[in-house]
Amino acid sequence: WILFESKAMRLVIFCGFLLHPFLCTADVLCRGYTVCDMCLGDPNCGWCSTTGACVAGTVHGPNEGNCTTWDWLGCGSNPPTPAPAPVPAPSPAPSPPVPPPSPPFIPPQGTNWWPAFGGSSAHTSYKPDSWGTVFPQLRWNATTPQGTAPVVYNGKVLVMAGGNLYILDEKTGKPLKSIDVGSGSYVGPPTVSEEGDLVYIEEIGGNEGIYVWAYDITTGKKMGKWTGGSQWGGFPYGVAPSQANHNVYVPTEGAMYTWSIPPHNTTDITTSVGCGCDYWTPAVTKKGRVFWSTEGPPAALGELRRNDSSRLWTVQFAATWEGYSNYWVAAVDESLGMAFVTSRGSGSLELGGINITYSGTEYPNSTSWGYPCARARGGNWGFEDFSPASDGKKVYVTCKDGVHAVDALTGTGAFVYQCSDCGGQPIITSDYVIVSGKRLTKVFRKGNAEHVALIDASGRMAYHGGWLFISEPPRLLAFQLASKSMVSVV
């Protein structure tokens, strides 16, 4: 027999001619190869190195029997073992995430905070809250020597005491931060910026004049300082920031200044108005209208021009000079179009309303109405405050026999909440009138003047969400007023 072999064709003459075709199986053909290369040339055969024979099989081994060393793809190599699944390399420890740039601060909405004296830079001392039966409960008591009027913002209570700004948790009284701002002859109450990122402190340094500090409310970092002007002690109301133009209005003896500070990238100071008198904390509305006030003589209230902070108009009214700076700040109700002021006579007090809605150059030139009452003699907190409050319908002022409420547009229809030893600006909610006295704080139902609660503490007050905060040096106390869920009407 003759065997012709090549990679392209292998013809076994012996099998094709001498054997029956059914006997020419792969096993027979494979055994005809005697060397490995020839064996692996046939796709039906593999080489068993263990026995040195070519036998029929597949990549996995011979069709029959076993072979320890099986070559299928190449001579001298074992059949391929399926590659193990790759073991992934251990993941490197994740890098700390890179914090995104801080977004601009957006004040919490719908929370009716109390960021300044009188509840806002407009000083109306009104919050449209409605809650259930009044049942005051003392929630916490913190030591704050010589504390100023407190303010409340974003879950924090802020008060100046003993040259330090104390920041406490609103619900627990837990101290969160204390910032040493120095000890001047008088330090005003803190005022939170309209953006909510800064807190301003006005400090009177005696002969050195007035300092105004700006601190980051979260980190406590000092962001700015302004020094200028002069003022005597007894400066209870602080500065007034404006949401509309990011300015801070600083009252001093003889002038009022406008301060634009970081983070708004400037420290410009301009003299707004000047006179031989004491300017007091102005009222600033959400739309950026600025209403300055002065004790005089004569006492006056007016508005500043927006472009250069000069006087736009002035309304004068009578007041008796008693050797001290002003005892009130104006309350401005922008939606009602009215500003409310008080002036002092000999043992008397007069509440006045000024229409601040005008067109062209027909500016206000007199009070729209006046309401007189006997003057109260303040409380036990170091200054006598006669600031009015307004809920958009009535105006409230503390007189000798209690809180008097009159129609905001006409000054008529007096209604009295009886309190013979009360003083200071009352706090007004949708349902209640709250006023502090020499030793006690009283809560009245607004609709019928019913006395519904008595709180054994008195002093300068702040309010938020059914809680009342009273600075009674050397204590700062927090009372929860509502026994049921408080509903905030925004």
Image: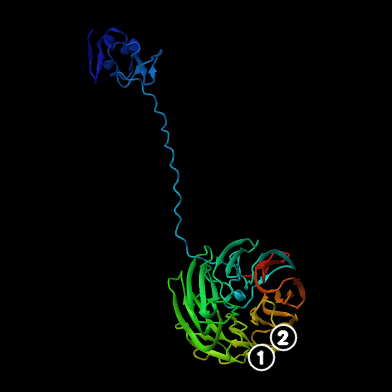
How much space separates mark 1 and mark 2, taking CA atoms? 20 Å
For residue 386, which quarter of the picture? bottom right
In the displayed structure, 180 sits above or below 43; it is below
The disc labelled 1 sits on which kind of residue? Gly
Quarter of the figure with the N terminus: top left
Res. 414 mark = 2
Residue designated by label 1: 345
- Counting other residues with Cα less than 10 Å from the Cα at mark 1, is it few (<14), some (14-19), or many (20 or more)? some
Res. 166 mark = none
For residue 392, which quarter of the picture? bottom right
Front of the two marks 1 and 2: 1
Secondary structure of the residue carrying numbered label 1: loop
Quarter of the figure with the C terminus: bottom right
Residue 213, position in %: x, y? 51, 72
Q: Which residue corresponds to the image point at 57% horizontal and 68% vertical from the top-left?
A: 165
Secondary structure of the residue carrying numbered label 2: loop
Q: Which residue corresponds to the image point at 64% horizontal and 68% vertical from the top-left?
A: 144
Q: Is residue 451 visible?
A: yes
**Foreground residue among 314 and 337:** 314
In the displayed structure, 382 sits above or below 478; it is below
Residue 143, position in %: x, y? 66, 66
